[in-house]
Image: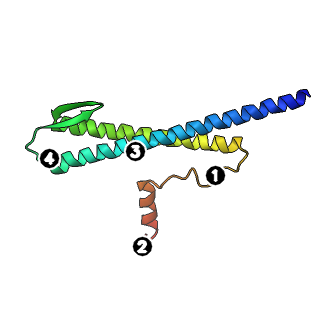
Amino acid sequence: METKVSDQRKLTEILLETERVADRILAYKQELVELDKRRQDTREALRLIEKHIPETQQRVWITIGSMLMKRDRHTAVELLRKDQQTTEAEIERIRMEQKLLVAKQRDLEHDQPLRGFNLKPLSNAEIAGIRSNLPGF
């Protein structure tokens, strides 16, 4: 009788942990969507300042958080680039954590690990090495 109760508790704990992990995965997905929207908005703002606002205009309006401010053109571009780098780093961090959570969830569900899930693109140096050794690549 005690074994049955113990098994039920263990099963309940596994199910609760699986649900917690799944909830965190979904929260990360939502955060990635919001960060991607922020990244695209920042990219659009940089493009607008660099391509469509004349160089003679020294001050531009930008949004910082929920405030609209008039800043020097150079300072505005710097702020936007810094925000872009921060957003990219945050997206990369969340993607790495999400991969770990997915692996943990699959482990809790006794599924096979995903194949090819941890692939990374070749760096520029690696591509240059391949090109120098393989003609026509």
Please tell me how crowded label 4 is: few (under 14), some (14-19), or many (20+) other residues with Cα within 10 Å: few
**Closest to the observer, 85 or 106:** 106
**Closest to the observer, 108 or 84:** 108
Q: Quadrant of residue 13?
A: top right
* CB under 8 Å between discs 1 and 3: no
Q: What whole-number distance in Å separates the C-alpha atoms at marks 4 and 3?
A: 25 Å
Mark earlier in primary sequence (4, 3) = 3
Label number found at residue 53? 4
Q: Is residue 19 left or right of residue 133?
A: right
Q: What whole-number distance in Å separates the C-alpha atoms at marks 1 and 4?
A: 47 Å
Q: What whole-number distance in Å separates the C-alpha atoms at marks 4 and 2?
A: 42 Å
Q: Nearer the viewer's eye, disc 4 or disc 2?
A: 4
Residue displayed at 44% across by 53% down = 123
Which amino acid type corresponds to the residue marked 2 in the rendered image?
Answer: Gly
Label number found at residue 36? 3
Image location of residue 92, percent across then percent down = 46, 42
Residue displayed at 59% across by 41% down = 100
Mark earlier in primary sequence (4, 2) = 4
Q: Quadrant of the N terminus?
A: top right
Q: Quadrant of the C terminus?
A: bottom left
* CB under 8 Å between discs 2 and 1: no
Which amino acid type corresponds to the residue marked 4 in the rendered image?
Answer: Ile
Residue displayed at 40% across by 44% down = 36
Query: Which residue carries the number 2 mark?
Result: 136
Which amino acid type corresponds to the residue marked 3 in the rendered image?
Answer: Asp
Q: Is residue 85 left or right of residue 29?
A: left
* CB under 8 Å between discs 1 and 4: no
Which amino acid type corresponds to the residue marked 1 in the rendered image?
Answer: Leu
Q: Nearer the viewer's eye, disc 2 or disc 1?
A: 1
